Amino acid sequence: MEKILERYERYSFVGRQQNAASESEFSYENWTLEYYRLKSKVELLQRNNSHYMGEDLDSLSVKELQNLEQQIDTALKHVRTRKNQLMFESITDLQKKVRNIEENNVQLAKQIKEKEKSVALAQQAEWEHQQQQGYNALSFLFPPPPHPSLNIGLASFDGHQ
């Protein structure tokens, strides 16, 4: 129905335009014709829009309703295709973000292990240093054990053999 009306308007406008072209100047009539052509096009678009919204369907024939249904189905397929495309792009972006986060987590885990190792080594060095200092501090209280060769000499000096 829409196509038929457009064809009618085009042919009637072309016929009017040919008549107007014979005139040498663009007259008030040409503007009037243009106005009516645009007005009928706006009315057609408004009518089609109301039909797409499910309004004023009583005046349509079965064939016009089938045509309208086909147009709506086609439009719905385009909408679903676009929606699926956007969802796929969104999923792809989210998967990339997940991969980046996982890579960052692996790097952070490595950094944590390296820091733990350096802290453990520093603690071990500090403990050894403290042990060394503690041994030096207590060495005046507890003299080191006598050297074995000195024991022999001391035992023979006491007279015990």
Image (cartoon, grey):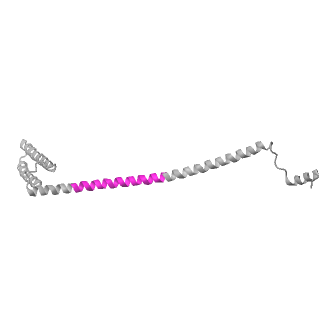
Number of disc labels: 0
Residue at screen point 33% across, 55% down = 88
The residue segment tinted magenta is 76-104
Q: Is residue 101 magenta?
A: yes
Quarter of the image with the N terminus is bottom left
Residue at screen point 60% across, 51% down = 117
User: Percent x, y for residue 76?
Assistant: 22, 55
* Along the viewing direction, whichever of 48 and 143 lies nearer the viewer: 143
Quarter of the image with the C terminus is bottom right
Q: Is residue 77 magenta?
A: yes
Instruction: Indicate left or right for 73 with 138 as reference.
Output: left
Residue at screen point 30% across, 55% down = 85
Instruction: Indicate left or right for 3 with 136 as reference.
Output: left
User: Percent x, y for residue 58?
Assistant: 8, 51
Q: Quadrant of residue 63?
A: bottom left
> Considering only vertical position in the picture, is 65 above or below 138?
below
Instruction: Indicate left or right for 134 with 3 as reference.
Output: right
* Secondary structure predominantly adopted by residues drawn in magenta: helix
User: Percent x, y for residue 51?
Assistant: 13, 50
* Along the viewing direction, whichever of 41 and 109 lies nearer the viewer: 109
User: Percent x, y for residue 78?
Assistant: 24, 55
Residue at screen point 9% across, 57% down = 62
